[in-house]
Image: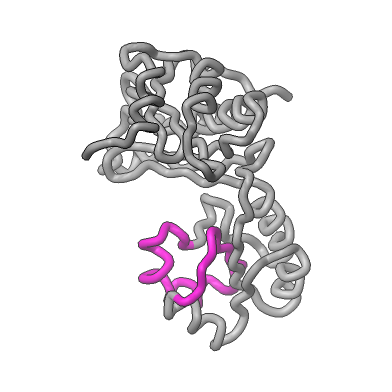
């Protein structure tokens, strides 16, 4: 596919044979971002695991210190007092009756995160055909299935910059770390938090190089390669 002039100008500034340090990559990605809108900065990782095996799955949740720079739309499945608490915490949609559940099942609602209380999972399970393909099915391991008393905290975290990532069928991770408009320090701290979570999520069955390839890019921009060893060696500041 032919690329436009702005893309060609951006890619000419990237050394395709170099593994940049995380700081260098962040600086370069910001420099070569060319969209008129505030693009998202993402990291992409080719992992050294086989996702066909249950003991080599990678799935984790991380709170980014500076959030994602966007408004996160949250759907909550709850009832009674938990539903009221979710609304007060800022949930955009609360599905607590047959009519609202039907709207979710029809696919007519747009949202970024779905959270459910434990007592609602019987109803939520019936919506798997809608939520599953979109990667929005609530899951205890991802922190999106919670006790009714914890619903306000879960909504707060989802709104504040909570990011869930998991390995895809081709052994890749794709994780947003913020916006191009973020300062370099903000992107670096978010990136460090992501790498710390990826490191801790390493399956015991994983052998050899854990991250085989690591790149960073902004929306529509060229990728910048990062040294995986340097990225994994970063430490989250207390």
Please state the horizontal and vertical placement of residue 87, each as a whole percent of the image: 73, 70
The vertical placement of 230 against 155, above or below, is above
Residue at 55 percent of width and 59 percent of height: 113
Instruction: Name the quadrant of the N terminus.
Output: top left
Which stretch is magenta? 108-137
Q: Position of residue 156 (x, y in %)?
A: 71, 55
Residue 185 vs 149, above or below: the answer is above
Residue in view at x 59 percent, y 72 percent: 77
Q: Relative to 54, is 68 on the left or the right? A: right
Is residue 227 magenta-colored?
no
The one of 59 and 14 positioned closer to us in this rendering:
14
69 relative to 198 in the view: left or right: right
Q: State yes or no: residue 119 in magenta.
A: yes
Q: Quadrant of residue 216?
A: top left
Q: Position of residue 33 (x, y in %)?
A: 49, 32
Q: Position of residue 133 (x, y in %)?
A: 36, 62
Residue at 34 percent across and 20 percent down: it is 209
- Is residue 226 something that shows in the picture? yes
Q: Is residue 232 visible?
A: no
Above or below, 161 relative to 190: below
Quadrant where the C terminus sits is: top right
What scheme was used to colour the molecule?
one colour
Q: Residue furthest top?
A: 18
Residue 74 falls in which quadrant of the image?
bottom right
Residue placed farthest to the bottom in the image?
Answer: 99
């Amino acid at each position: 596919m032919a690329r436009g002039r702005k893309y060609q100008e951006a890619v000419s500034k990237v050394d395709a044979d170099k593994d940049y340090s995380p700081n260098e990559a962040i600086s370069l990605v910001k420099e070569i971002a060319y969209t008129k809108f505030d693009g998202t900065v993402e990291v992409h990782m080719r992992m050294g695991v086989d996702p066909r095996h249950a003991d080599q799955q990678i799935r984790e949740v991380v709170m980014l210190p500076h959030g994602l720079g966007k408004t996160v739309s949250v759907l909550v499945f709850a009832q009674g007092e938990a539903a009221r608490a979710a609304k007060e915490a800022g949930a955009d949609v609360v599905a607590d009756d047959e009519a609202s559940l039907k709207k979710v099942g029809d696919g007519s609602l747009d949202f970024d995160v779905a959270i459910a209380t434990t007592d609602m999972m019987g109803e939520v399970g019936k919506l798997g055909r809608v939520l599953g393909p979109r990667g929005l099915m609530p899951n205890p391991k991802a922190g999106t299935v919670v006790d009714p008393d914890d619903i306000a905290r879960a909504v707060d975290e989802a709104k504040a910059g909570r990011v869930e990532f998991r390995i895809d069928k081709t052994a890749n991770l794709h994780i947003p770390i913020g916006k191009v408009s973020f300062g370099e320090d903000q992107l670096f701290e978010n990136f460090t938090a992501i790498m710390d979570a990826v490191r801790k999520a390493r399956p015991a069955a994983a052998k050899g190089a854990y991250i085989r390839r690591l790149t960073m890019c902004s929306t529509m921009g060229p990728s910048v390669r990062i040294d995986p060893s340097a990225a994994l060696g970063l430490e989250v500041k207390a």
